[in-house]
């Protein structure tokens, strides 16, 4: 536990012609790690962990593309609306990058090799769909899912897997669409026997409550 600032490390991996990944590396040896999409944003949130009474936690964020439609294709395994058509090939390619390439970079570049019980996946909005998908599809890797204001492109499947990651959801009282999505996931996971926290906070989509909730999520999953 330390309030000493960590450092940010950014490198470019080969995926999709070159995709950046940024890591927030705590000053002390990492005792937990959080992987995330939207790495340009999430890794900067290491600052909210610095002064908290938490184990040293590394954040590893894969950067998103500028094109929002492509981002949705990469982050959601099931999206079919009039505006956005689901692209399974794009999702599968990004999943391989996120699960294999980014983790390999973390292991070789940053020497981070932690078990599922000390590893989480985190996302906000469409990134929360990515977090849910990665957690449900790879519970042997990500033991916890941190999910803020999820979109509705990925909804709970009719049959959830037998092994479920622990899941912490949060949404704002002034974003009813996203609050409904989060509640839907919380109910489905609880019904399947999952360990679930569902938090409702004052605020609308894009407000700071997701960032403020982040240390609470880390404490819930990894706190001493």
Image (cartoon, rainbow, N blue to C red):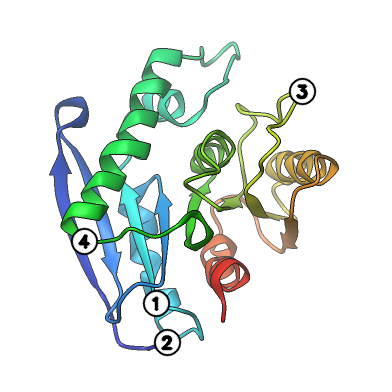
Q: Is 63 in front, or is 97?
A: 97
User: Are the residues flagged by discs 3 and 1 in contact, CB closer than 8 Å?
Assistant: no
Using the image, determine if residue 64 lies above or below residue 122: above
Could you give the CA–CA distance between mark 1 and mark 4, rounded to whole angstroms?
14 Å
Q: Earlier in the sequence, mark 1 or mark 4?
A: 1
Q: Earlier in the sequence, mark 3 or mark 1?
A: 1
Using the image, determine if residue 193 lies above or below residue 112: above
Q: Residues within 10 Å of mark 2 (few under 14, many from 20)?
A: some
Q: Residues within 10 Å of mark 3 (few under 14, many from 20)?
A: few
User: Are the residues flagged by discs 2 and 1 in contact, CB closer than 8 Å?
Assistant: yes
User: Are the residues flagged by discs 3 and 4 in contact, CB closer than 8 Å?
Assistant: no
Could you give the CA–CA distance between mark 2 and mark 4, rounded to whole angstroms?
19 Å
Residue at which label 1 appears: 56
Label 2 sits on a secondary structure element that is: loop
Residue at which label 3 appears: 158
Q: Earlier in the sequence, mark 3 or mark 4?
A: 4
- The C terminus is located in which quarter? bottom right
Residue ID at (29%, 60%): 112
Label 3 sits on a secondary structure element that is: loop
Using the image, determine if residue 51 lies above or below residue 199: below
Residue ID at (34%, 29%): 96
Residue at which label 2 appears: 1
- The N terminus is located in which quarter? bottom left
- Residue 214 in the image: state x and y as whole percent: 53, 66
- Residue 9 in the image: state x and y as whole percent: 18, 61
Residue at which label 4 appears: 110
């Amino acid at each position: 536990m330390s309030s000493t600032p960590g450092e940010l490390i950014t490198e470019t991996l080969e995926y999709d012609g070159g995709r950046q990944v940024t890591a927030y590396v705590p000053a002390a040896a990492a005792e937990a790690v959080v992987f995330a999409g939207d790495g340009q944003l999430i890794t900067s949130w290491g600052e909210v962990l610095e002064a908290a009474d938490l184990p040293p936690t590394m954040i590893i964020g894969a950067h998103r593309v500028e094109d929002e439609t492509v981002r949705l294709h990469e982050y959601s395994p099931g999206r079919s609306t009039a505006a956005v058509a689901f692209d399974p090939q794009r999702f599968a390619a990004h999943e391989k990058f996120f699960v294999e390439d980014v983790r390999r970079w973390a292991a070789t570049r940053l020497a981070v090799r932690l078990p599922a019980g000390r590893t989480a996946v985190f996302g906000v909005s469409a990134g929360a769909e990515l977090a849910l998908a990665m957690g449900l599809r790879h519970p042997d890797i990500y033991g916890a899912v941190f999910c803020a204001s999820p979109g509705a492109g990925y909804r709970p499947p009719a049959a959830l897997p037998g092994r479920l990651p622990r899941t912490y959801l949060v949404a704002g009282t002034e974003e009813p669409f996203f609050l409904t999505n989060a509640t839907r996931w919380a109910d489905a996971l609880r019904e399947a026997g999952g360990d679930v926290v569902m938090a409702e906070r004052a605020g609308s989509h894009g407000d700071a409550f997701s960032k403020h909730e982040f240390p609470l999520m880390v404490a819930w999953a990894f706190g001493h």
